[in-house]
Amino acid sequence: MQLFCNLSLLVVIIVSSAVAAHFNISLEEEQQIGVPIIDLRKVLNLSTNPTKKTEFKILEQTLHVDRSSGLAPSSRVTDQTGWFKIEQSTGILSQTKRIDRDLLCGKVELCFIQIIFLPGLYMSVMHLDVYIKDLNDNSPCFPSPSIEINVSEDLEVNHEISLDRYKATDVDLGNNSMIQYTLLHHDVFFKARQYRDPVGHEHLSLVVSHILDYEQTKVHRMLLLASDMGTSSQSSSVPLLIHLIDENDNKPNFEKTLYDVYLSENTPPGEILTRVQASDRDSGDLGYVHYVIPASDQDRREGYPPVSVNETTGTVSLCEKLDYHVHNE
Ligand SMILES: [Ca+2]
Ligand SMILES: [Ca+2]
Ligand SMILES: [Ca+2]
Ligand SMILES: [Ca+2]
């Protein structure tokens, strides 16, 4: 008879006495329902003679999750309504419902279902502990479908931006839930850093690795990949967008270094002489340019300068009548 199929199974008989036997097997989660797991008749060395009737009967099935120190059962299901059944006449154990270790046991390492059964009417009660082994059947899961962060373009090289609140989680156990992060499609401006602090907490951050410039790139788009360290690694990724916040790091620049205007002495006041123009690479108010000709109050009282500039347009006009002998310097 072909038993055990592809199940990962370990049978350890711990006690076999006249009073009660107690033995363990380990079984991977998510096995197929109805597939034979173990032939209890064989394990218990009972007769296979069909005339010698042994009727197996499950008395109780209890899930044990060692959440702290003790082995307090967290749930109790009895008889055939539990996770397993034993064929009454053959003693073959099989699953009757799906076992999702991640759901049943959470992150608790020691987790088993105890089956208390009778291998025959006149036999002693036996205990079979089925330890549920974790499968790497979950990929890391990010808390949001994308990560978007706003940072100042003034951040210095080596500045770290914490990504702790965006870290992925994996409901599997041990290495199957240990996560390694990789930054994909990233430019020279950022790199990922993952580290464990002295008290053992895992951290994830983004390190500025090149001077940022809002005027050059406003949004840096990357992909953050989380891979677990299980035997057949599972992974997932989210888009990571870094929006730069503009800072006033550019000053206005005139399009010319010198504006030279030649006038005749009889140019009438109000005449437009030229237009100055400057631009500023910053955005919004940070890049708004207004014009003024610096002069003290005394200068103005003394008629200097004889020109004025429109604050917004940069138009320069003559504001008083010129005198060649006064203004030709
Ligand atoms: Ca799992
Ligand atoms: Ca996993
Ligand atoms: Ca500016
Ligand atoms: Ca700027």
Image (cartoon, rainbow, N blue to C red):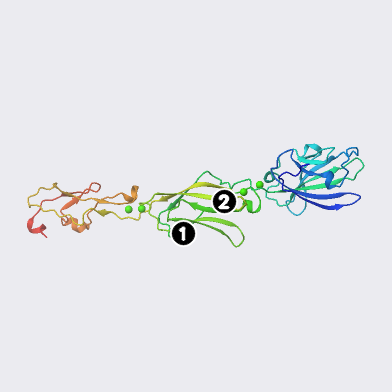
Tell me: 257 left or right of 155.
left
Residue holding disc 2: 227
- Given contact means CB atoms under 8 Å apart, are the residues at marks 1 and 2 in contact? no
Name the quarter where the C terminus is drawn. bottom left
Q: Nearer the viewer, residue 65 or 183?
A: 183
Tell me: 25 left or right of 213.
right
Residue 99 place in picture, x, y as percent? 71, 42
Residue holding disc 1: 159
Q: Nearer the viewer, residue 48 or 126?
A: 48
In the image, what residue type sits under mark 1? Answer: His
How many angstroms separate mark 1 from mark 2 (CA)? Answer: 25 Å
Residue 31 place in picture, x, y as percent? 70, 42
Which of the marked residues, 1 or 2, is nearer the chain's N terminus?
Answer: 1
Residue 283 place in picture, x, y as percent? 34, 49
Residue 208 place in picture, x, y as percent? 45, 57
* Residue displayed at 83% across by 45% down: 42
Tell me: 230 left or right of 113.
left
Classify mark 2: helix, strand or loop.
strand
In the image, what residue type sits under mark 2? Answer: Ser
